[in-house]
Image (cartoon, helix red, strand yellow):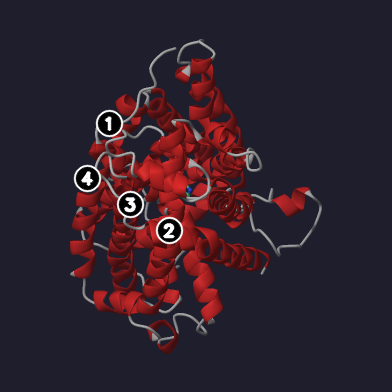
Amino acid sequence: MEERKGFGSNFGFLMAAVGSAVGLGNIWGFPNKMGASGGFTFLIIYLILAVICGFIVMLGELALGRKTGKGAVAAYHAISKRFKWVGWLGVASAFLIMSFYCALGGYCIKYVVLNVGNLFGTGFGSNGMNGGDVFGAFLTNQSEGVIYGLIFVVLTMLIVMGGVSGGIEKFCGIGMPALFVMLLICIIRACTLPGAVNGLKYMFVPGWAVANGVIAEAPSIFEVISTAGGQMFFSLSIGMGAMITYGSYLDKKEHLEKNAVLIIVMDTLVALMAGLCVMPARFALDPEGPIGGPKLLFITMQNVFDSMDGAIGPIFGIIFYLLVVLAAVSSSISLLETVVAHFVDKAREEGKGDRRKKYSLIASILIALLCVLVCVDGLGSNGIAPWELLKLDGYKGWSDCWLDFFDMISEGVFMPLGGLLMTLMIGWEIGPEVVKNECEATEGHKMSSYPFFKVCCKYITPLCMLLILYGQLKSFFG
Ligand code: TRP
């Protein structure tokens, strides 16, 4: 049997895992949710949940992966009788998330091109249209959307074909530090704009958003907790086996606890930094623009760049959208790897050699099909939303477009469910000692968080997860 190749260094692993966690969710989700849900209060609740749920699930996943040395599907199979099938839930989530992630990643590439066009005054720039019109025209131009979506799928596929150390580690080892530097440049520009302080107040000061009419009324504490919980889950890429897969490539000499903490800290840091970039810019240069979701990214931010003088606007536009592309690609490769790892391992075990290229291609073709659907739908602009196909005319209760529909199933149901089942399995079936033993497989390492881990894993985390699941479902069904 061929040797199973993993990450070359702990730094490479860390950058890949942080790359998985840092994604679109950090940029358009976190800043707005924090502002609309009580500023610092939201941050504190987010951090508490990150400790009692995020850390537990993250560490559990990394440990399961490294212990079994297998991808998500085979890891559950090897370790549990009752929860054998949970790995497949992860693969299904990965497919669904990829479908819209690639579409949006493609949009980001389009916006890099758009700003290059603006810089040189060519026909593929904004041509004097405002951000809203440019985005509207793009969404209804179905073939253009599909082409960019497919470019993104191919990019993801090529990196995953390169293997764990040759593709993923290399890309993230350069891409993540580059993202960090570009983000710093954008923060400095945004925070020195006149009026930027309102963005900071929106994001950090409790009650400011309501007092200044940015949102109509303050959410209840239950809503805040479920928003923070859902965001935390999605943002850390947990509950669907991506971290099991990455953990399976990690060397026994690396500390799992330290890595889990670092991933969470860096993800939260980048989410806060993204807020320091987008919110001050929005309040300074486009105070009426959309404040969250895809529209924040593609309408408001483009208006921001359009309103800067001369070549500076397009230059910042290029830097900003490139950093978003980096964030998106580093997440989508971990999603694809979650799917591909299983088949690659199986082929290797059956002595057929490493068929990574073949499986990456097959998985990418399936993902491309879903991605084309999301692109053709154009965030619901083109009248092929799910309820219209199901002939539920005018029924818009649960999803406005294919993107929301896939998001609802994956983020709203599969991921929290996956996290819940994993903690139940560790807490009650195989026992939390399994995680302790795996952490302590690193020579000379004592798992200092074990008492905490044990209590959380058995009681606290599953309960929180049920609450998050309930809150997510409620918010999707409105
Ligand atoms: N964490 C990513 C973000 O913040 C999205 C995501 C969710 C993800 N689950 C994942 C990425 C699994 C990779 C793997 O945008």
Q: Earlier in the sequence, mark 1 or mark 3?
A: 1
Q: Position of residue 94 (x, y in %)?
A: 54, 41
Q: Where residue 447 is drawn, which disc sits there? A: 3
**CA gap, disc 2 and disc 1:** 33 Å
What is the crowding at mark 4: few (fewer than 14 residues within 10 Å), some, or many (at least 20)?
few
**CA gap, disc 2 and disc 4:** 31 Å
Pointer 4 residue: 177
Which dot, 2 or 4, sits closer to the camera?
A: 2
Q: Earlier in the sequence, mark 2 or mark 4?
A: 4
Which dot, 1 or 3, sits closer to the camera?
A: 3
Pointer 2 residue: 453
- Seen in the image, is 10 located left or right of residue 105? left
Pointer 1 residue: 170
- Seen in the image, is 85 located left or right of residue 320? right
Amino acid at circle 3 = Met
| Front-lying residue, 397 or 265 | 265
Q: Earlier in the sequence, mark 3 or mark 4?
A: 4
Q: Earlier in the sequence, mark 2 or mark 3?
A: 3
Q: What residue do we see at 52% from left, 84% from top?
A: 216
**CA gap, disc 2 and disc 3:** 10 Å
